[in-house]
Image: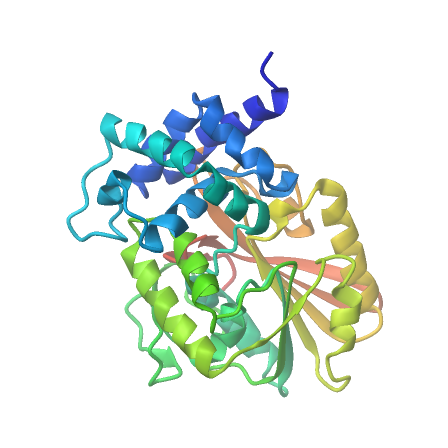
């Protein structure tokens, strides 16, 4: 009898194939294969339940290949060879052989690593709202699910919205562009004034460690060479200006983390692509904790979370503001940029934009 949990994990690869369609032919091909291969899918059972997701298995394989491990599978990864082969049925056989031949190394990574994509391009959506918050003086950035803290360095990158002028740090090696949809950027886009920055993550990564930096690269899909280039540049910035990171649970350690922020600084608490790893009860506890903190000191809550057109339910307050568009497809993957503020103990939630979760476009919903 096949364990029901293995079937559940295998079914997630069907959804992941839809998510990667048109963006990663390699992962789409492999996902459809693994959804039918319970022996390979079962490797993910070594992970914590919240981490039993296809991208963790794929990142573990990618990490081994990036470390220099020789195998025919590497020939299909554009991140490894400039003359990569297109994914086909042969690729599937090589992938299965790689997974089963290197089961112990993969299991070790699946047990100890987490999906921690530091998508630097998301900073282009965060920049304007953070800048607006800092008009009256410096703010403190606190990121939940910070990974290596690269988005805490939002003021050290340069940006361009559509065909507009470049803004931000003019000499930065990290240059981020996006398509601008809907209304024009509703805020100023000068660098925010940041007086303090702190990241919280259950397993923070250190940009100065070669294995941690490689793991972040492994979490990027193999065809996304521009994302890899941006990540490499951002890791260089982080090595020069390392953000302070704290290891801790996003819910239980949040109040102690906030307590470290100097009292005179208003807080911008933010996170991106984090809520998907919470259970519904954890989401509720997270929101309740933030409400309690905001009753004690000035705080803004900025959330950039995906899955809005998937059937995940309303995981955070901002998603209740979402209304589906007629032209949205079931496989559309974008995030909702939400902003919450408090006055006299009452929270007001505002939906600011729809954002491609890889930062390729922003559709501003406010003028």
**Left/right of residue 260 with respect to residue 11 in the rendered view:** right
Residue lying at 79% horizontally and 51% vertically, measured from the top left:
285
Q: Quadrant of residue 157?
A: bottom left
The quarter of the image holding the N terminus is: top right
Residue displayed at 55% across by 71% down: 129
Q: Position of residue 340 (x, y in %)?
A: 68, 62
Number of callouts in the render?
0
On the image, the x and y values in percent for residue 24 come to 32, 42
- State the residue in front, 83 or 22: 83
Height in image: 116 above or below 161? above
Q: Residue furthest top?
A: 1
Kindly indicate the quadrant of the structure image that contains residue 255. Answer: bottom right
| Front position in the image: 18 or 336 | 18
What residue is rendered at 84% in x and 69% in y? 295
Colour mapping used in the image: rainbow
Residue projecting furthest to the left: 83
Instruction: Place residue 216 in its image quadrant.
Output: bottom left
In the displayed structure image, the side of residue 191 where residue 88 appears, left or right: left
Q: Nearer the viewer, residue 2 or 226?
A: 2
Location of residue 268 in the rendering, given as x and y in whole percent from the top left corner? 65, 72
The residue lying toward the viewer, choosing from 285 and 240, is 240
Question: Left or right: 353 with respect to 18?
Answer: right
299 above or below 292?
below
Residue 348 in view, yes or no: yes
Residue 46's spot in the image, x, y percent?
Answer: 59, 38
In this rendering, does residue 190 appear at all? Answer: no
């Amino acid at each position: 009898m096949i364990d029901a949990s293995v079937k559940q994990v295998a079914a997630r690869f069907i959804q992941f194939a839809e998510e990667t369609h048109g963006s990663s032919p390699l992962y789409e091909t492999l996902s459809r294969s693994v959804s039918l291969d319970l022996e390979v899918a079962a490797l993910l059972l070594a992970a914590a339940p919240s981490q039993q997701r296809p991208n963790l298995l794929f990142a573990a394989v990618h990490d081994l290949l990036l470390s220099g491990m020789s195998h025919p599978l590497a020939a299909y990864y554009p991140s490894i060879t400039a003359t990569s082969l297109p994914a086909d049925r042969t690729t599937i056989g090589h992938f299965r052989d790689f997974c089963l031949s290197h089961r112990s190394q993969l299991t070790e990574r699946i047990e100890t690593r987490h999906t921690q994509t530091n998508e630097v391009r998301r900073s282009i959506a965060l920049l304007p709202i953070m800048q607006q918050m800092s008009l009256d003086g410096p703010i403190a950035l606190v990121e939940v699910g910070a990974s290596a803290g690269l988005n805490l360095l939002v003021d050290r990158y340069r940006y361009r919205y559509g065909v507009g002028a470049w803004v931000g740090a003019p000499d930065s090696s990290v240059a981020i562009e996006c398509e601008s949809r809907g209304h024009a950027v509703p805020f100023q886009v000068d660098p925010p004034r940041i007086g303090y920055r702190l990241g919280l993550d259950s397993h923070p990564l250190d940009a100065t460690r070669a294995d941690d930096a490689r793991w972040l690269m492994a979490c990027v899909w193999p065809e996304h060479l521009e994302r890899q280039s941006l990540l490499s540049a951002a890791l260089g910035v982080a090595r020069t200006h390392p953000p302070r990171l704290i290891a801790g649970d996003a819910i239980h350690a949040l109040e102690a983390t906030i307590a470290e922020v100097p009292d005179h600084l208003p807080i911008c608490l933010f996170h991106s692509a984090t809520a998907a790893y919470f259970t519904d009860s954890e989401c509720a506890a997270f929101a309740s904790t933030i409400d309690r903190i905001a009753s004690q000191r000035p705080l803004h809550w900025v959330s950039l979370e995906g899955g809005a057109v998937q059937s995940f339910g309303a995981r955070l307050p901002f998603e209740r503001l979402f209304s589906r568009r007629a032209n949205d497809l079931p496989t559309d993957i974008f995030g909702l940029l939400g902003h919450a503020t408090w006055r006299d103990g009452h929270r007001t939630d505002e939906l600011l934009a729809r954002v491609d979760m890889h930062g390729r476009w922003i559709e501003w919903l406010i003028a």
